[in-house]
Image (cartoon, helix red, strand yellow):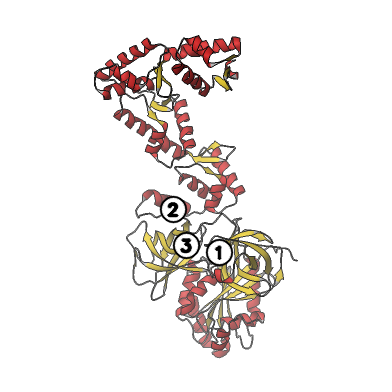
Amino acid sequence: MADIQRRHIVIGTAGHIDHGKSALVKALTGVDPDRLKEEKERGMTTDLGFVFYGDNATIIDVPGHEKFVRHMVAGASTVDIVMFVVAADDGIMPQTYEHLEILKLLAIKKGVVVISKKDMVKPDRLQIVINDIKDLMAGSFLENAPFVAVSNITSDGIDELKKILNNLIAETEAKLDRGIFRMGIDRCFSIKGFGTVVAGTVLSGKTKLGDELELLPEKKKVKIRGIEVHNKQVNEVGTGFRAAINLVGAEKEEIERGDVLAQPGFFEPSLYLNASLFLLTSVQKPLKNFARLRIHLGTKEILGRVVFLDKKVLQSGEKAMVQFRLESPAVASINDQYVIRTYSPQVTIGGGTIIEVAAVKVKGYDEDLLAHLERVETAAPIVLVEEDLLSSFELPKKTLEIAKDINLPVSDVKEMVNKLVEQKKVLCLDAKRELYYHEKNIETLKQKIIEQIKEFHKQNPTSIGIPALELLKKISPGLDKFLLDTTLNGLEKQGVVQIAADKKIRLTEFKPILEKAIDENVQKIEKILLAQGFQPLDFKEVKTKLAGKETDIKKAYQYLLDNKILINIGEGLVLHQQYVKQAETKLIDFLKKNKEIRISQFRDLLNASRRAVLPLLIYFDTRGITIRREDVRVLSSKHQ
């Protein structure tokens, strides 16, 4: 079994119907790309054809008829080099224009212009066609491309075309490898004795025999039983190669053109895609907001509506930021090219680049979103990492999560996150768990915390502070608690807030303001509890000893609890803080001398009722002063 080859180039045909594209491929390779019975009977290409050209290239032959442009786009989406074919007898025709626009929208960079059927015209006619084509190609990627006139019948010019193709293949760089395996499926068939086989061009990464992959958008788990490249069984296949992959776990009927085979966990099917969109200058009417379109993405055609994010309407020759709201889920990666066609009649009108996959439904004219999309549009990996972290306010992110969001290898993401940490743009919250959060979001979170505490103080002037859980809910119910605690600890170190033992938070500068009635009740309640000694009370019992409004009594009682003047020892019972401190001191001194203490001994030590003794012991257990061992307590190690 052969090993993977290093590099592979995909050549595509383009041009109007009956301009000799399939015959040209046969003249170059000796193989007819028309594989369907219908195609041979009608003498017209209706679907994609695939033929190998030497050992390191594949030719994809696309249909030229306007009815099959969707197949043409599916084939052209993976092309490195195009053979743009114009027949000498017909000259430039409708699909000549449309195919050229599609190739430009798909950002194809290299090609050769082939004038076919030179044997059917006189030299002066041939020259007229060449001049017309040169005018058409002006300003496009084919403006300075080589031209060659050929005859598929006599083979005149074929050798020259081969030399041109070989030079272009040698000059063409391999596709950019993002390191995560993804292959758009353009063919699916079943072979007796082997089962389901899918074919396509590997867009990124590599895979090998036995690998488990994900069939998308269905999210179906499959396993590789065999891989074939150039009619040879291989162990693995990588970026840029045409491959036929024998799968276990999916039937032919479950797969269709446009599905994606990918490394599990890195690509999320989505009904919303954010993108840049260019409307062709040849389009006569402006594109309206919410228009229904045919979106050609990779090897798939999807119906959806376009929502403008920075315009109300898009005029020909203009660019806009848009969101596509799809009728069925799409699988895409950042920087994928796409083409749009009108719903009916079907006409190519524009295209662009996918900026954000798995987007959320948004409205237009969101300045923050537009600024974010403009930054992401650069597609620079470190920008993608930073923007992914910036977009996550409620949760810190792990490197693996970032890698899955932007479809990059975890090792690359780790390297870029470390650079951002060094630049003090990103904060590492937990090195062991690899949790990261953007510094700008930290500052925003700090401001929200301060605003919410200020508002709480305003509404509750007698309360010592806001409970941590209430603060979290007011900022955002989805906010990560670890993130909140980390940020609060940072604010406490800065002297901005103070955090009580019961997790109530107040601004350091805040001083509770007591109304006269509440202040009077505070003094009365404290006096009552001082007189009680080690005989605890609950709120109902305190209330019966006082006259006045219950609301004033309750506020005073809470004030004393918040300020640790009264201590809730459990079961709703309170003691004055001086007696709790006395009990703690006596307990520690006793245990240092006697090593252990029973409930009865503690009761005698305090001369207190059992009602106070057991809750107090449990209170000291929970605060790490004592440790319970069956019927006795011993002193914890930190107090020994």
Judge whether 521 appears above or below 119 on screen.
Answer: above
Kind of residue at disc 3: Pro
Q: Residues within 10 Å of mark 2 (few under 14, many from 20)?
A: some
In terms of secondary structure, where does tag 3 sit?
Answer: strand
Instruction: Answer left or right for 368 relative to 428.
Output: left
Could you give the CA–CA distance between mark 1 and mark 3, rounded to whole angstroms? 12 Å
Q: Viewer-nearest of labels 1 and 2?
A: 1
Q: Residues within 10 Å of mark 1 (few under 14, many from 20)?
A: many
Query: Is the C terminus in the top left, top right, bottom left or bottom right quadrant?
Result: top right
**Between residues 20 and 170, which one lies in front from this camera angle?**
20
Residue 17 on image: x %, y % = 50, 82
Kind of residue at disc 2: Leu
Residue 405 on image: x %, y % = 52, 51
In terms of secondary structure, where does tag 1 sit?
Answer: strand
Kind of residue at disc 1: Val
Q: What residue sits right under mark 2 in the picture?
A: 373
Q: Quadrant of residue 248?
A: bottom right
Q: Quadrant of residue 633?
A: top right
Judge whether 266 appears above or below 304 on screen.
Answer: above
Query: Is the N terminus in the top left, top right, bottom left or bottom right quadrant?
Result: bottom right
Identify which residue is drawn at 38% across, 75% down. Answer: 344
Q: Is residue 164 visible?
A: no
Q: What residue sits right under mark 1 in the picture?
A: 260
In terms of secondary structure, where does tag 2 sit?
Answer: helix
Which residue, as the protein is rendered here, is positioned at the far right?
Answer: 1
Q: What residue sits right under mark 3 in the picture?
A: 329
Residue 331 on image: x %, y % = 51, 61
Earlier sequence position, callout 2 versus callout 3: 3
* Dots 1, 2 in contact, CB < 8 A: no
Judge whether 296 appears above or below 458 on screen.
Answer: below
Identify which residue is drawn at 34% across, 68% down. Answer: 286
Q: Viewer-nearest of labels 2 and 3?
A: 3
